[in-house]
Image: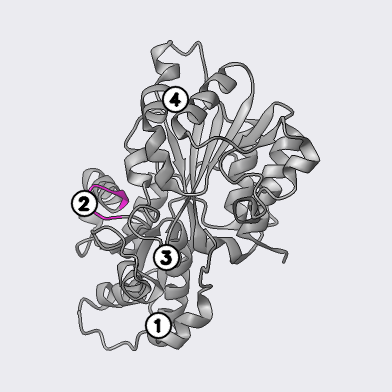
Amino acid sequence: MKTMTYREAIARSMRGALEKNPRSIIYGLGVTDFTGIFGTTLGLEKEFGSGRVFDTPLSEDAMTGFAVGAALNGLYPIHIHIRADFMLLAMNQLVNSIAKYKYMYGGLFELPLLVRAVIGRSWGQGAQHSQSLQALLSHVPGLTVVMPASAQSVLDTYEYAATKARFPVISLEHRLLYDYSFNLDAGARPADPFTSRLVREGRHVTVAATSVMVADAVNAAKFVSEKAGIEAEVIDLHCLTRPDSKLLLDSVRKTGRLIVADAGWAPFGVCAEISRLVATSDPGLLKAPVQEIAQAHSPCPTAKTLENHFYPDMGTVADAICRLASGRKDHGVELPSADYKRRLYKEFKGPF
């Protein structure tokens, strides 16, 4: 089975977008830097020219407005933010223009474009450079928000976005995923990549996860299966604005237990939304209250030792699975040690 890193999948997708759609352009702070947005845009300026791949001034609002004009005039802009936090400077364009343009003009205009932004833990960058804003963006009608959790989901989603999608897509990529290797699926591609997908089958507990928490959930599921015989089903929510409610409800109907693991904060977020979906559809499916796993509800600390406590990991998920499956807080299952987890994780060391 062929494998590919998350970084390689994005780099291939960016090159493919430029090759398959001659009207596509890629731009953003650091796009032509020697690091090339963690290696995902390296060499593209030289290969396709500075008219299609270029760096920008420090003006996110203006550069996002540029994307609006470019899309309206037939180009396909791919705007990249090396930190999702910088998107806050472009919220007027994203929320008041991009999300509403087609609606306000009665469908006469479309804004096909892709905004890529990086989220997640790193090496102590603090409260203003570590935010995961998926819930904030998903709340706005008109924006399609994805969080690719594997190389295959990157390949499928970005190709579809660049060649077929006629709507604005915001993709949040987790720093830790770039160096992860994934098996590629040789089967038929999904007709619509903007949906949830079943990653692992199980019968005791359903774990609905986003971004890097999907990898954590899979690792946790394997661990508790070996240690305690508990089989957790893992669903990658992937597209937060188009979750596959049938897939989710069918899984909860089978297991009766649900954990939502998100790479952001829990209040008013993805955990709350998935719980709402189940509660308003068929709350009788649940044999126990929904459990949520998310980062601590506070700004991210800068100190690495504190940052390690701020973010959940596969040990957090394994503990939640065991507690929910057994119905006891003191479930008695030995949790993964620090050494065990260290062998699974690739520490992010910068520079950005």
Task: State the residue position of label 1.
Answer: 229
Give the label on residue 98, or none.
Answer: 4
Choose the circle earlier in sequence order: 2 or 4: 4
Q: Position of residue 275 (x, y in %)?
A: 25, 51
Q: Marks 2 and 4, Cα distance to the nearest angstrom?
A: 35 Å
- Outermost residue toward the front in this view: 57
Q: Position of residue 335 (x, y in %)?
A: 35, 85
Give the label, 1 or 4, closer to the camera: 4
Give the label on residue 233, or none.
Answer: 3
The span picked out in magenta is 265-270
Which amino acid, by three-letter code, is at mark 3? Glu
Q: Residue at x 25, y 50 (%)?
A: 272
SS class, disc 1: loop
Q: Position of residue 21 (x, y in %)?
A: 72, 30
Which amino acid, by three-letter code, is at mark 4? Ile
Residue 234's quadrant in the figure?
Answer: bottom left
Choose the circle earlier in sequence order: 4 or 3: 4
Give the label on residue 283, or none.
Answer: 2
SS class, disc 3: strand
Choose the circle earlier in sequence order: 3 or 2: 3
Quick one: label 4, few (<14), some, or many (20+) residues within 10 Å?
Answer: many
Is 224 rendered above or below residue 130?
A: below
Q: Are marks 2 and 1 in contact (CB under 8 Å)?
A: no
Which amino acid, by three-letter code, is at mark 1? Gly
SS class, disc 4: helix
Is 351 rendered above or below residue 63?
A: below
